[in-house]
Image (cartoon, rainbow, N blue to C red):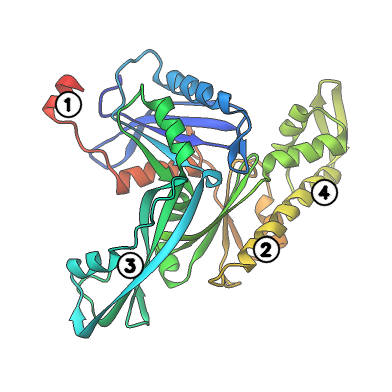
Amino acid sequence: MFNNCDIAIVDVGSDMIYIKIGEIAKDNVFHIKSSAEMYYDGFMEGDWLNGDDVSRAVRCCLDKALYNFSTKLSAIYVGVPGDFARVQTRSNKLSFGCNHKINIGDINAIKEDLYPSKDGRFEVVSTHEVSYRLDGKYETLAPLNKSCFMLEVKLSFAMCKKSFCDLFKTILSDYSRKIKFVDLSTAQCLMATDKDLRIKNSAVLVDIGYLTTDIAYIKGDGLIALNTLPIGGGHIAYDLSYGLDMQYNDALSLKSTIDFNGENTLVKIGTNNGIVEEEKSYISMIASARLEEIAEEISKIIANYPIKYEKFLKIYLTGRGIADMKGVRSVMANALGRQCELIRAMYEDRNKIYLSQASIIQYVCQKDKPSKPSLINKLFG
């Protein structure tokens, strides 16, 4: 049974809405009580393909997850996809004139005046530390009690389109009085990449969804670049549909069975016109061509980063657009000319959880754990 400690996690995919409802227990673990997912028309290039469909899909999905319970949720956390997000980095420095031990007052002082000015289009949803630099040399994320003559800080501000925030506040206002937004790309990077690596070097995470691909570049605990491409796994299905002259839904099912490994064989495909056979190599060739196109665009973006992403650093891959294909990591590694690590969906008590959902959950548990309700809230909440 739901109670007023329960929170909802809303993951806005480019073709599907995912919702997990649960409670953060004393062990600081999110215990899932209910979940739901629902297809909708999605988004591309920073806009909804059918704006009227968004509200219907989110409400239906949340109602499905809540079943017949009417208790309001204590909070709802909405992941902001890359198409509706941007990052801004800003830096400042503080000279002490002597060898000085850094205190919390110094850290607060150096962060002053870095907050971006409001422009009416985007609003800041979170602030993250990219790095502290001591005397222009030593980088750290924990400068407290360290000594230096000069302290520099670089902050990353995760921002969301105001229209996105306003829309979801309107949709979700009947379900909770507390609606918060989590920058999805930042949350995924914080979960999927190694912190020591991010402090010493940096990391790139590529999320290939159904219609879009997000490329996030993280340094320390904050993004220093975020790019999106209007292309994803759904385009592979379109290519298969065109190349094999079949219905799109059949091609989408075929895509989920692709295995780039092994010997060439004939593959039997169930279609509306019965069972047809195609060579595995031809199917793989079609899918590989689209993956290579995506990889080429990713490589162009990485090459233009103001802070060089060294060749020895790997690329982290995730996303529902590629997770169902076997051998995709090798194809992408060859196309990108880099070592790649593929992060697939995980399972918890038979609940399938993608990195996008898991990262929002982890972010909420670690960064913004909801407080326990007071007696007044229990009586009148």
Question: Pointer 2: what residue?
Answer: 300
Cα–Cα gap, marks 2 and 1: 52 Å
- The mark that comes first in sequence, 2 or 3, is 3
For the residues carrying marks 4 and 1, which lies nearer the camera in this image?
Answer: 1
Q: Nearer the viewer, residue 94 or 280?
A: 94
Tell how many labels: 4
Quarter of the image that includes the N terminus? top left
Check disc 1: other Cα within 10 Å, few if <14, some if 14-19, many if 20+.
few
CB atoms at circles 4 and 3 under 8 Å apart? no
Question: Pointer 1: what residue?
Answer: 377
Query: Which disc, if any, is residue 285?
Result: 4
Query: Which disc, if any, is residue 345?
Result: none
Which type of secondary structure does the marked residue at label 2 adopt?
helix
Is any part of residue 34 visible from this angle? no
Residue 45, given in percent of the width and then of the height, sits at 63, 43
Cα–Cα gap, marks 2 and 3: 30 Å
Which type of secondary structure does the marked residue at label 3 adopt?
loop
Kind of residue at badge 3: Leu
Kind of residue at badge 1: Asn
Cα–Cα gap, marks 4 and 2: 23 Å
Kind of residue at badge 2: Lys
